[in-house]
Image: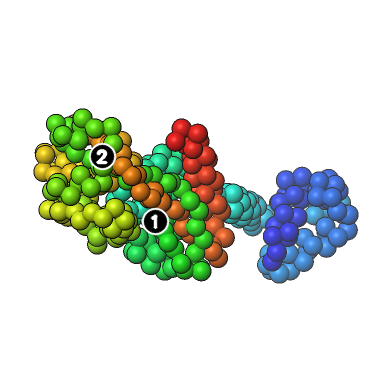
Amino acid sequence: MELRHLRYFIAVAEELHFGRAALKLGIAQPPLSQQIRALERELGILLLQRTKRRVQLTEPGRVFLEAGRAVLDGVERAVEAARRAERGQVGRLAIGFAPWSDFTELPRMVKLFGERHPDVQLELHNLTVAEQLAALRAGRIDVGFVRPPVTDATLLTEPVLSEPIVVVFHAGHRFAKLRRVPVLDLAREPCTLLARRRAPAYYDHIAGLCRAGGLTLETKQEVEHPQTLLGLVAAGLGVSLVPGTFATASRVGVAHRWLDPPGPALETILTWRRDDPSPLVREFLAVVREVTQARRPRA
């Protein structure tokens, strides 16, 4: 039995007239009558009682009509669900991010995407860059916010954020009197950094900046999360070098200054699988681009 047989039968059952049903369906009456008889033969059930004057539903026909309507309604819902998924309106999107992403535009991007796609289930996974790349390859996440470089040819990338490295310190520190902090002045300061195992790209970037400036940092603590780092700085337990977005976080007792020389910027990129046709990834990428473009004139 095909879906068209159900549609033919339902039209006749609702009109109780083969001529009107054929007109409604846009087909000739004789083929319609043949299709209904073929359906009855296939089922082994008389669905319609026909006389020269009228057509009536049999009791099995009435039961079959209700069940047939339910089947067609289910098919229509399935088709609409598939179309919504194709438009990126339903489904699940898994997003990978590192600890430092809390301070970037990521929360705004996720919020905006969620507002526009309320029926999409969002999953956020706090992972290191290496963990995100592994999760992308395995299909456990759909997109990830990472530091470059990404050399895997199976992944695509797009720049999201470029930010300077700044020095953060307790508000009463001597650096508060300076407009910029000379890099070499950091040599005499106890320093707190994010642990390399949690943010290897950031850690290596800081190491490169220090080498370029002829600086050796006196690292006293390495911590797992940016909030912990800022908390130690606020307590006066050393200074730190952090991405510029860290410095904009509201934290009582913490101040920041640009470095002199500023050194290379720290980059953030979005990455996703090259062979992923997901409309949700496409829709999320559009939101990321919108937020990124809106931010650039203010930078």
Please give left or right for residue 69 compared with residue 169 in the image: right
- Residue 40 position, x and y percent, is 73, 64
Q: Using the rendered view, name the quadrant where residue 164 is placed.
A: top left
Residue 287 visible from this viewpoint: no
Image vertical order of residue 240 relative to residue 50, above or below: above
Q: Which residue is mark 2?
A: 181
Residue 34 visible from this viewpoint: yes
Q: Nearer the viewer, residue 122 or 84?
A: 122
Closest to the camera, between mark 2 and mark 1, is: 2
Task: Please tell me which residue is depicted at 48% across the width and 51% down the height of the picture.
Answer: 159
Q: Which quadrant does the N terminus fall into?
A: bottom right
- Residue 118 position, x and y percent, is 47, 41
Q: Around disc 1, counting alpha carbons within 10 Å, would you say few (fewer than 14), some (14 to 19), or many (20 or more)?
A: many
Please give left or right for residue 127 compared with residue 143 in the image: left
Rendered image: mark on residue 146: 1
Task: Please tell me which residue is depicted at 74% across the width and 68% down the height of the picture.
Answer: 41
Q: How is the image coloured?
A: rainbow
Task: Please tell me which residue is depicted at 77% across the width and 60% down the height of the picture.
Answer: 36
Q: Nearer the viewer, residue 75 or 35?
A: 75
What's the amino acid at mark 1?
A: Val
